[in-house]
Image (tube, rainbow, N blue to C red):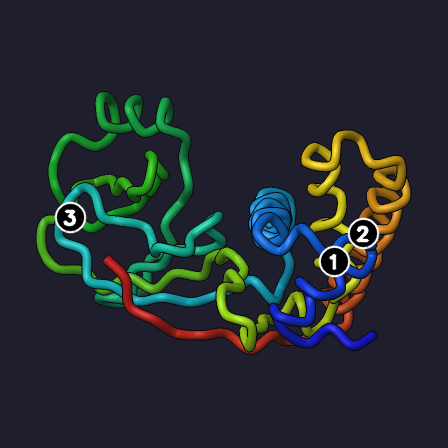
């Protein structure tokens, strides 16, 4: 059974559950699977680059942001990689080390915003690499890299989220085991690719 898009994934879930009355809730199982994957998965296929101009202490993170890899100020020479600090460390730096505006050296994440320190004293061009959420499936023809490369992970993770609705389906342990196996294979493959120097395709976008 080929699973190449959202419509085929929904059909496969119904077939595996041997139920024809779940059309309205199967998309919810898939939504939950995507949310779960976004919480634990950080692999090269998720790395995206973005560009922005910052001129204030705070700026919005990209809408699909999960976790930062690198933030670099490219205005001026040399370029300045920003150091990540926690919010507690940011407060200490502002109180003891940095008291005036200038070229940012540090960044933190607070809610859905980046915080920079020092506060920019002008316009600075920022380039960032970050882990992005997988593109959600919404239309029957939709697909994404995860469904293309690991349809089994998508399928079995979605099936595990059917259990609460079906009131502890006895097959839950099977779905969970298969989902875990697919996840481990994905992570092992990603680690192997990292050692062999495989380079993912990276999208460039603007944000802020």
Q: CA distance from mark 2 to mark 3?
A: 55 Å
| Residue 190 left/right relative to 119 | right
Q: CA distance from mark 2 to mark 1?
A: 6 Å
Residue labelled with disc 1? 13
Residue labelled with disc 2? 17
N-terminal of the pair, mark 3 or mark 1, is 1
Instruction: Residue 93 in the image: state x and y as whole percent.
Output: 29, 28
N-terminal of the pair, mark 2 or mark 3, is 2
Q: CA distance from mark 3 to mark 1?
A: 51 Å
Residue at 36% across, 22% down: 88
Which element is circle 2 on?
helix
Instruction: Residue 176 in the image: state x and y as whole percent.
Output: 83, 42
48 vs 159, nearest the viewer? 159
50 vs 10, nearest the viewer? 10
Q: How many marks?
A: 3
Residue labelled with disc 3? 120
């Amino acid at each position: 059974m080929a699973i190449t898009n959202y419509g085929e994934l929904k059909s496969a879930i119904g077939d595996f559950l041997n139920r024809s009355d779940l059309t309205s809730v199967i998309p919810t199982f898939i939504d939950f699977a995507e949310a779960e994957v976004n919480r634990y998965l950080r692999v090269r296929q998720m790395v995206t680059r973005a560009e922005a101009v910052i001129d204030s202490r705070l700026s919005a993170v990209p809408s699909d942001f999960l976790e930062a890899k690198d933030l670099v100020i490219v205005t001026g020479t040399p370029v300045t990689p920003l150091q990540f600090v926690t919010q507690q460390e940011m407060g200490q730096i502002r109180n003891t080390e940095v008291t005036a505006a200038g070229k940012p050296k540090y960044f933190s994440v607070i809610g859905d915003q980046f915080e920079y320190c020092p506060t920019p004293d002008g316009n600075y061009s920022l380039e960032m690499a970050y882990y992005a959420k997988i593109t959600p499936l919404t239309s029957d023809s939709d697909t994404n890299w995860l469904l293309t490369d690991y349809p089994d992970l998508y399928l079995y993770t979605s099936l595990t989220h059917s259990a609460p609705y079906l009131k502890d389906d006895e097959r839950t342990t099977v779905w969970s085991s298969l989902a875990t196996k697919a996840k481990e294979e994905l992570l092992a493959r990603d680690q192997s690719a990292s050692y062999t120097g495989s380079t993912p395709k990276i999208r460039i976008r603007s944000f802020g």
